[in-house]
Image: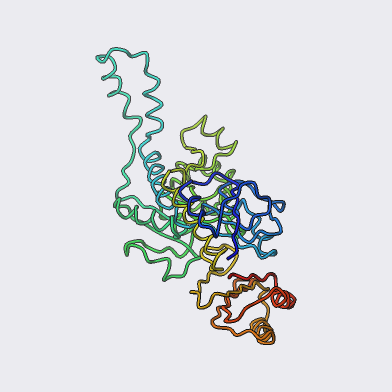
Amino acid sequence: MKEYTVKTLSKVAEVGLTRLDSGLCTLDEKNDDPEGILIRSTKMDRSNLNDSLLAISRAGAGVNNIPVKECTEKGIVVFNTPGANANAVKELVLAGLMLSSRNIYSSIDFVRGLEQLSDMNELEPFLEENKKQFKGNELANSSLGVVGLGAIGSRVAGMGVSLDMNVFGFDPALSVEAAWRLPSNVEPCESLEDLFFQSDYISLHIPAIDSTKGIINKELLKNANKACLLNFARHEVTNNKDILEALDAGNLSNYVTDFPTPELIKRANSKADVILLPHIGASTMQAEENCAVMAVDQLKDFLVNGNIKNSVNFPNVSLPRSTEKRITITNKNVPAMIGKIATKIGNLGLNIADMSNVSRGDIAYNIIDIEDQIDEKSLNKLREIEDVINVRLLN
């Protein structure tokens, strides 16, 4: 069988990389023309898309650092690892809720500034006198709005229920059936405006795509009622200028985010209503290992078997092998392609044992198990079919 080479462009947890040493997929960091790439947050561009590249697997959820459109045009599959870091982010959202509701950050800073009080008889009454300025609110019986109910958002919603919060959810991208496999007391909202109006705390868990960029803006924020906004999704989904104005106007009480920007840092240094973290949502040992294992397993299964799971630009498909010879064909999603491919295979004297054809947007993907021997000449005939992007033989 063919041996595939994989290269990393970011530091990936060793527990994942050890799964490549199988004789079928091997790690080769010196190879400038690998079939597979593993990546975390490193920014990629067209220069990374070498001629032999078949797939990129992102150890994380966001793929803003990968030129997905160019990959699709070249027939390169892009994977991510949804859910692998979900618990890590959920726990940081909990920390954000506590930081904003109980004035923990400000109270810690206050105590750090009391070095001059060296006598406990003086310190204790001073603390009793001044602690009232840090009085906060309990989360129980307050309302939590969760925007985006995927792998992370659904966990955050469940966490809110367990904290005795009144939880609202909104996610137009998910089907009703998929979105509401949640605790029955998570109440769906018909619109973002409705969710912002009802929520004391609002947690964002949506991807940064064209339809969501800047979605948290001035018009939407007018619906908030002194809410705390938490952004552990992506900085692109918010308009920071509008958030600062909403803080000044009182529509927002606090803004907690994992995505600092210069204007937010300036605000945080002068006022306590902005709390910034350095993008540590998925920075736990467990999350990094989970992401690495999932990223490697998905990449290896695609390279060796042609199966696709958790791709952001190709349809998901898995077909158990029924023969030793397998062809995968990527083509433009245009009419009559299945017939053209099947006819060409028949004309080449090859018999199809099993086949799966799936499509997504402008791309269609075929897994075809063949009962006969296949030579390079036959593969080239398949590549000559109009609108075929690539053809692979997986022995």
Give the number of marks: 0
Give x and y (percent) for residue 311.
Answer: 55, 63
What colouring style does the render use?
Answer: rainbow
Give x and y (percent) for residue 330.
Answer: 65, 71
Horizontal arrangement in the rendering, residue 52 relative to residue 247 (left or right): right
Seen in the picture, residue 164 relative to 354 is either above or below; the reply is above
Classify the position of the C terminus by image quarter.
Answer: bottom right
- Between 260 and 267, the residue placed more toward the observer is 260
Q: Residue at x 62, y 78 (%)?
A: 373
Q: In the orientation shown, which residue stands out farthest toward the left?
A: 121
- Between 120 and 39, the residue placed more toward the observer is 39
Q: Residue at x 50, y 50 (%)?
A: 17
Seen in the picture, residue 23 relative to 314 is either above or below; the reply is above
Horizontal arrangement in the rendering, residue 117 relative to residue 232 (left or right): left
Q: Quadrant of residue 285?
A: top left
Horizontal arrangement in the rendering, residue 1 relative to residue 276 (left or right): right
Horizontal arrangement in the rendering, residue 6 relative to residue 84 (left or right): right
- Between 30 and 79, the residue placed more toward the observer is 30
Q: Residue at x 31, y 27 (%)?
A: 131
Give x and y (percent) for residue 209.
Answer: 59, 58
Classify the position of the N terminus by image quarter.
Answer: bottom right
Give x and y (percent) for residue 89.
Answer: 43, 48
Q: Quadrant of residue 24?
A: bottom right
Q: Residue at x 52, y 29 (%)?
A: 270
